[in-house]
Image (cartoon, rainbow, N blue to C red):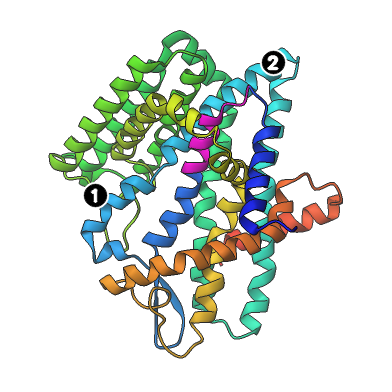
């Protein structure tokens, strides 16, 4: 007798659970998967389009109309958690590499290669697609909009690679200062924010905010390294949770930071590009909560039905990050040719009906991502068949796409 689809899924989940080593830290994997899935969910919910009279797509956001939507960005902005577990995992991985006698350079090359291959893949594919789509009648403005959406999430990879390279120094800092090693990073961002938004803000150069880029995202990573080095425990986690929450509230209520954790078209200030002190306050609170909930999360993930999706998500991490905006565009670009606006897709995100329609579109975007990912996940594996010539061509295409997407061409 053939098994039902549900029985097959249960069997697959049980098999994945049985193959998982007993020493695997399921809570860390679960937190990573949660933070990762928040990226496409946030982009799909908080980003939209408008359609001009020529049928071209332009970026828009429901946050520009619905200010009450901003708290949703607090939940979906989970990069602090991602950097936290990244620091934790990198510290353990580096320690194991050193124990095997592996050099720091070799360890780092392996980590960076796993990040770089998928990025090179998606940018090279899009560089090849752009002239084809243009020849098929897709407006240049739509291609520019889509290219910007595709490349925007990839900033994370570059920052993450740089911070990963600093792992040995993060470990030394954790050995000396424990969790307090992250405090100077917080202080650095606070100083830059004061200069940007304080009494002398009008006299400050525009590039000053870029000084927050490295310490802003490194803050949670350093906390993760301290956690992995067993220098951050429950007492410190409570301090992070309470202190981060208090600082977050103070920045919003007393210092009038923008409520949204993501950029809003038309707004002069943004919290995330580069990160403001509000991002670090949220990361501190989220990190404290994650550490305190670790054991409970680990127990929950011993259920095969919950553990299997975590494994699948982590195995496709870079594919999800690199291709989720392509899944959105795979629906929106054809929708722009239908002769009118499509609710929740190409219609302006300025009505409550748009929100309901966009939620209905989420399963479609998810299905498209699964379909696209089934064809592109190979970019995550080592490119064994790629000759140097092909690698050089992929690099050239990727560079060309970056120039186009960033508006330099």
192, 157: nearer the viewer: 157
Q: Residue at x 33, y 69 (%)?
A: 356
Q: Is residue 12 visible?
A: yes
Between residue 183 and residue 12, name the one nearer to us: 12
Identify the mark at residue 98; answer none if there is no mark.
2
Q: Earlier in the sequence, mark 1 or mark 2?
A: 2
**Residue hosting label 1:** 259
Figure label count: 2
Q: Quadrant of residue 291?
A: top left
Q: Secondary structure at mark 2?
A: helix
Number of residues whose C-alpha sits closer than 10 Å to that of mark 2, classed few (under 14), some (14–19) or many (20 or more): few
Residue at x 47%, y 42% (from the top left corner): 35
Residue 28 counted in the magenta span? yes
User: Furthest residue to the bottom?
Assistant: 339
Q: Which residues are magenta?
A: 23-34
Q: Is residue 269 visible?
A: no
- Measured as percent of width and height from the top left, residue 268 is found at 26, 56
Q: Quadrant of the C terminus?
A: bottom right
């Amino acid at each position: 007798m053939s098994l039902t689809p549900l029985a097959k899924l249960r069997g697959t989940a049980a098999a994945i659970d049985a193959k998982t080593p007993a020493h695997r830290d399921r809570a860390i994997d679960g937190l990573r998967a949660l933070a990762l899935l928040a990226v496409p969910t946030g982009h799909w919910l908080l980003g939209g389009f408008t359609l001009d009279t020529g049928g071209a797509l332009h970026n828009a956001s429901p946050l520009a109309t619905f200010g009450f939507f901003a708290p949703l960005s607090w939940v979906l902005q989970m990069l602090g958690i991602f950097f936290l577990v990244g620091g934790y995992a990198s510290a353990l991985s580096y320690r194991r590499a050193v124990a095997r006698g592996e050099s720091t350079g070799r360890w780092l090359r392996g980590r960076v290669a796993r990040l770089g291959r998928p990025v090179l893949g998606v940018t090279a594919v899009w560089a090849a697609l752009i002239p084809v789509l243009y020849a098929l009648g897709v407006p240049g403005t739509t291609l520019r909009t889509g290219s910007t959406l595709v490349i925007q999430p990839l900033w994370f990879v570059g920052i993450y690679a740089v911070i990963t390279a600093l792992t040995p120094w993060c470990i030394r800092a954790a050995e000396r200062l424990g969790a307090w090693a992250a405090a100077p990073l917080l202080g650095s961002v606070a100083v830059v924010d004061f200069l940007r938004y304080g009494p002398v803000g009008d006299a400050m150069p525009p590039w000053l905010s870029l000084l927050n880029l490295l310490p802003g995202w490194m803050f949670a990573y350093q906390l993760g390294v301290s956690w992995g080095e067993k220098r951050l425990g429950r007492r410190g986690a409570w301090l992070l949770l309470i202190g981060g929450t208090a600082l977050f509230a103070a920045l919003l209520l007393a210092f009038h930071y923008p409520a949204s954790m993501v950029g809003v078209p038309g707004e002069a200030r943004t919290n995330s590009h580069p990160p403001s002190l509000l991002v670090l306050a949220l990361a501190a609170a989220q990190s404290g909560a994650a550490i305190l909930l670790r054991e409970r999360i680990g127990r929950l993930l011993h259920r095969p039905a919950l553990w299997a999706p975590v494994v699948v998500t982590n195995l496709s991490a870079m594919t999800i990050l690199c291709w989720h905006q392509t899944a959105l565009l795979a629906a929106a670009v054809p929708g722009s040719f239908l002769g009118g606006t499509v609710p929740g897709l190409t219609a302006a995100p300025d009505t409550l009906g748009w929100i309901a329609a966009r939620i209905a579109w989420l399963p479609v975007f998810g299905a498209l991502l699964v379909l696209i990912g089934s064809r592109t996940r190979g970019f995550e594996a080592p490119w064994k068949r790629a000759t140097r010539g092909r690698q050089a061509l992929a690099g050239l295409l990727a560079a060309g796409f970056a120039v186009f997407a960033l508006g330099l061409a």
